[in-house]
Amino acid sequence: MHELQALGDRLVNLSAHQLESMRLPEDLLEAVLAARGMTKHEARRRQLQFIGRLMRDIEADSVREQLAAWDGQSKASAQRLHDIERWRTLLLQDDGALTEFAARYDAGPMLQPLRACLREARREQAGAAEGARAGRHFRELFRLLREAMEHAATTSGAPAPDSPDDGPR
């Protein structure tokens, strides 16, 4: 029973698009939407108990599976962003890292724009130390790295990009 209430709490915290895609029974959907507007702790607790009771009547395994799939996607997405950030930091610190990145992600065609953006981002960082505002090329470098990594993943059918810390140097 408590597990179903916790599952109901997860449903309450979903976005409108995710909640719509769950295809929940109408009475359960109304209860979830009502719980969203409740700010009083006791009222929300009672509503979650009600949601848990309604969830006894549905196949909760399908809800669990969908939530697990979304958790996996968001974790993988966050990991990809962290990998890109690590590569950007490494590239800004180490001149030889660009060659390694190009070899690992087959970024030959993007090498020239990456090199130019990297040069400007380093110039921005040097200016930021003197009080100037850094950012445009720093963000542009992130975008170029993301495109190169996504392109490599789609053309090779490889899984999500790995971080610069993985594998030999």
Image: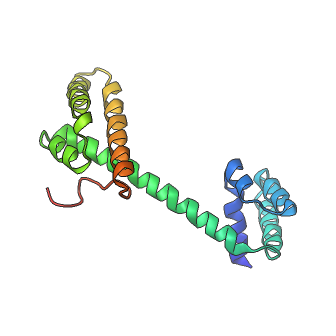
Q: Quadrant of residue 108?
A: top left
In the rendered view, tell whether residue 153 sits above or below residue 54: above
Q: Residue at x 29, y 48 (%)?
A: 86
Residue 123 location (% of width, % of height):
21, 24
Point out the residue furthest to the bottom here.
1
Residue 140 location (% of width, % of height):
34, 30
Residue 47 location (% of width, % of height):
81, 64
Q: Quadrant of the N terminus?
A: bottom right
Q: Quadrant of the C terminus?
A: bottom left
Q: Residue at x 85, y 57 (%)?
A: 30
Q: Nearer the viewer, residue 45 or 79?
A: 79
In the rendered view, tell whether residue 80 sits above or below residue 111: below
Q: Quadrant of residue 2?
A: bottom right
Residue 15 location (% of width, % of height):
67, 50
Q: Nearer the viewer, residue 42 or 96?
A: 96
In the rendered view, tell whether residue 29 sits above or below residue 37: below
Q: Residue at x 32, y 40 (%)?
A: 145
